[in-house]
Image: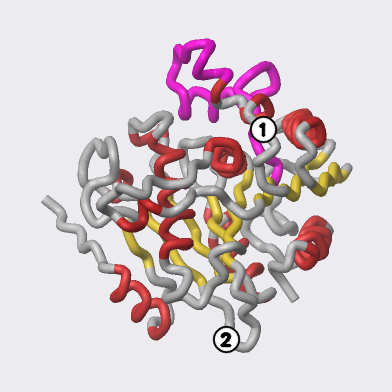
């Protein structure tokens, strides 16, 4: 049987500061809630990417890569992290549990909430502002990000684990061609991987995040493309409508051009040309105090 080493947070910090490769740490020092085994696919992790010290703004972003809740797209994880680092934002790429490994809701939400809490609980150690921690996701990872944006909690002050005492509410969100609904305009593969083959109407309603927005939902930057054939732009439009109805600030961009999964732009593997969303998002992040 393979053995896996769980690093304490102090060791994680040291390795992050001095190792060339980004440090990877499990979200729980023991098995994750509902873990089905001890394989790497059963162990949710965070991979930390720190900006140069002279660029760091103190803001941080938890990144949820897309992949239909069946895989994790590298260009929507590490690619985003390095772009954020260029602009002074510390990034943490979340490896969350997947339907292809036998997991369904709430495992994915548990992982995202734990990731946000972990970053906030260690804000002082990592020189971060605990009130400038956002969540970002693409496609199905965007659904997971929108789930935390609408299903966060204040933490449990009586928890024995200090991380569990911390709020999981993001301070803002960035949704990139995100799946939002589990209803008519959903992405069927993401829905099956997240909810199983025969979800109840109540579960479909609960994870249709356009129906879960409240006045306490954080501000959100939303972008999609008109020609996206993988996930309909109605997902972005309906979420923005719900934000508007609840008086939650947002920035919405529907660009004409760009296939699903475009990431930063220029294709999935070679990102030489940045899509205009990156500049629009930086403009918005600057207004939120996340970048200089």
What's the coloring here? Answer: secondary structure
Residue for badge 1: 213
Toward the bottom, the furthest residue is 54
Residue sticking out furthest to the right: 256
User: As drawn, which residue projects farthest toward the front?
Assistant: 158
Observer able to see residue 273: no
80 displayed left or right of 215: left
39 relative position to 19: left or right: left
Quadrant for the C terminus, please.
Answer: bottom right
Image position of 74 with respect to 42: above or below: below
**Nearer to us in this view, 18 or 21:** 18
Residue 201: x and y, percent? 53, 11
Let me know if residue 199 is in the magenta part: yes
Label 1, label 2: how far apart the Cα atoms are: 36 Å
Q: Can you tell which quarter of the image residue 284 is in?
A: bottom right
Q: Residue at x 66, y 41 (%)?
A: 217
**Observer-nearest residue: 108 or 69?**
108
For numbered disc 2, what is the local secondary structure? loop
Which residue sits at x=69%, y=63%? Answer: 271
Say which label, 1 or 2, has the lower sequence index.
2
User: In the image, which residues are magenta?
Assistant: 176-205
Residue 194 lies, with reference to residue 148, above or below; the image says above
**Residue drawn 60% across the image and 48% down it:** 137
Label 2 crowd (10 A; few <14 / some 14-19 / many >=20): few
Q: Against 4, is 154 above or below? A: above
């Amino acid at each position: 049987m393979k053995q896996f080493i769980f690093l304490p947070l102090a060791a994680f910090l040291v390795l992050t500061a001095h190792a060339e490769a980004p440090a990877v740490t499990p979200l729980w020092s023991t098995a994750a809630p509902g873990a089905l085994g001890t394989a790497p696919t059963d162990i949710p992790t965070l991979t930390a990417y720190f900006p140069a010290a002279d660029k760091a703004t103190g803001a941080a972003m938890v990144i949820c890569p897309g992949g239909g809740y069946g895989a994790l797209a590298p260009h929507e994880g590490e690619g985003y992290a390095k772009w954020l680092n260029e602009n002074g934002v510390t990034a943490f790429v979340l490896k969350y549990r997947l339907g292809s490994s036998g997991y369904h809701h709430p495992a994915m939400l548990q992982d995202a909430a734990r990731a946000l809490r972990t970053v906030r609980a260690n804000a002082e150690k990592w020189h971060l502002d605990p009130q400038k921690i956002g969540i970002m996701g693409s496609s199905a990872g965007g659904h997971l990000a929108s789930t935390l944006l609408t299903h966060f909690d204040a933490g449990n002050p009586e928890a024995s684990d200090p991380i569990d005492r911390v709020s999981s509410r993001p301070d803002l969100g960035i949704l990139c061609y995100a799946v939002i609904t589990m209803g008519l305009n959903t992405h069927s593969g993401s829905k099956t991987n997240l909810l199983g083959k025969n979800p109840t109407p109540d579960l479909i309603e609960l994870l249709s995040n356009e129906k879960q927005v409240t006045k306490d939902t954080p501000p959100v930057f939303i972008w999609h493309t008109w020609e996206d054939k993988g996930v309909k732009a109605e997902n972005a439009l309906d979420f923005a409508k719900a934000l508007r109805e609840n008086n939650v600030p947002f920035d919405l961009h529907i660009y004409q051009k760009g296939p699903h999964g475009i990431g930063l732009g220029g294709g999935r593997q070679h990102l030489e040309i940045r899509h205009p969303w990156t500049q629009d998002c930086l403009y918005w992040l600057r207004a939120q105090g996340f970048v200089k």
